[in-house]
Every structure is written in structure tokens, then in C-alpha cells.
Amino acid sequence: MKKVNGFLIVLVMVWTAISCGGKKEEASTAAKEDYGTPQEEVAATKSDPIAQGESLVKANDCKTCHDKTNKIIGPSHTDVAKKYDFTDANVKKLAEKIIKGGSGNWGQVPMTAHPNVSESDAELMAKYVLSLDGEKEH
């Protein structure tokens, strides 16, 4: 009986190792399809401030509280775009919120401050968010 139990344990461990390895490869392939190679992503964003902002949003912890289209803890980025016109004043206002945090605009849950994000990066992130409703900067 002990030999059978030992064999089953080893069999389950081997199956688990094989299964996990396959999923990592699939996830890696999916990530490449979504974002392209790092060189392609950098080339695409150099001349496009909206794409730069999107890359910065993806690279930071924004997705912890925000989704592009669905409310999580904070509002969806699309809902933010619908609330604010795409103006220089609103870009600066939202960039300040990204850096300093705040509360009251979307309920009682405060937005976490991000003091390590530069003003220029926060402005690019805000431009990306404000573009999500299809509005162009004016």
C-alpha cells in the first residue's frame, strides 16, 4: 500500500510540474502578442504621448485599483475620461492626483499617492487616461 501511495504522490508531482511549465509558456506567448517585443513597444511610444502614457500606466501599480473599463477600487479609466474634458488644465489636475493622491471625487476611498512618479510621467499617464473616451487633446 505504501508503494502505491508513494507512486501516486510522485505521479501527481510530475503532472503538476509539467502542467505549470506549459502554462508559463502560454502566458509568455500571450504577453508577447499583447505588447510586442520591448523594442517594438519603445519604438511605438517614442513619438506618441498617448502610447507613452499607456506604457507608464501598465508599468506602474495602477491596475491594482483601476481597470480600463471596469470599476475596481477606484473608477475605471474610461469613466475618468468621460468625467473630465481633455484639456491641459485637467491633465495637470489628474497628474497632481496621481502624484499626491486624494479623495472625495469618486467616493470615500482615497487614491494612493505616487510620489516617485515624475510630473512629466504623470502627465503622460493622465493624457492616456483622458484619451480613452475617444476625445482628443484641446
Image: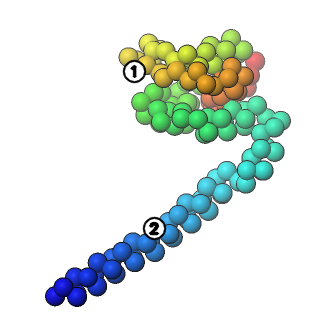
Amino acid type of the residue tagged 1 in the rendering: Val
Q: Earlier in the sequence, mark 1 or mark 2?
A: 2
Marks 1 and 2: CB-CB under 8 Å? no
Q: In which quarter of the image is residue 60?
A: top right
Callout 1: SS: loop
In the displayed structure, does residue 23 sit left or right of residue 120?
left
Q: Is mark 2 on a helix, strand or loop?
A: helix
The residue singled out by tag 1 in the image is 109
Of tags 1 and 2, which is closer to the observer?
A: 2
Q: Residue at x 66, y 57 (%)?
A: 32
Neighbor class of circle 2 (other Cα within 10 Å; few <14, some 14-19, many 20+) is few
Q: Is residue 137 visible?
A: yes
Q: Which residue is drawn at 38% across and 17% down?
A: 108
Q: Position of residue 126 (x, y in %)?
A: 64, 24
27 or 113, which is in the foreground? 113
Query: In the depicted view, which residue is nearer to us: 37 or 89?
Result: 37
The structure residue drawn at horizontal position 63% and vertical position 19%, both measured from the top left corner, is 95
Badge count: 2
Residue 54 appears at what percent x and percent y? 66, 36
Q: Name the residue under label 2.
A: 20
Q: Where the C terminus falls, by quadrant?
A: top right
- Tell me the amino acid under the disc marked 2: Cys
- The Cα–Cα distance between marks 1 and 2, rounded to whole angstroms, is 37 Å
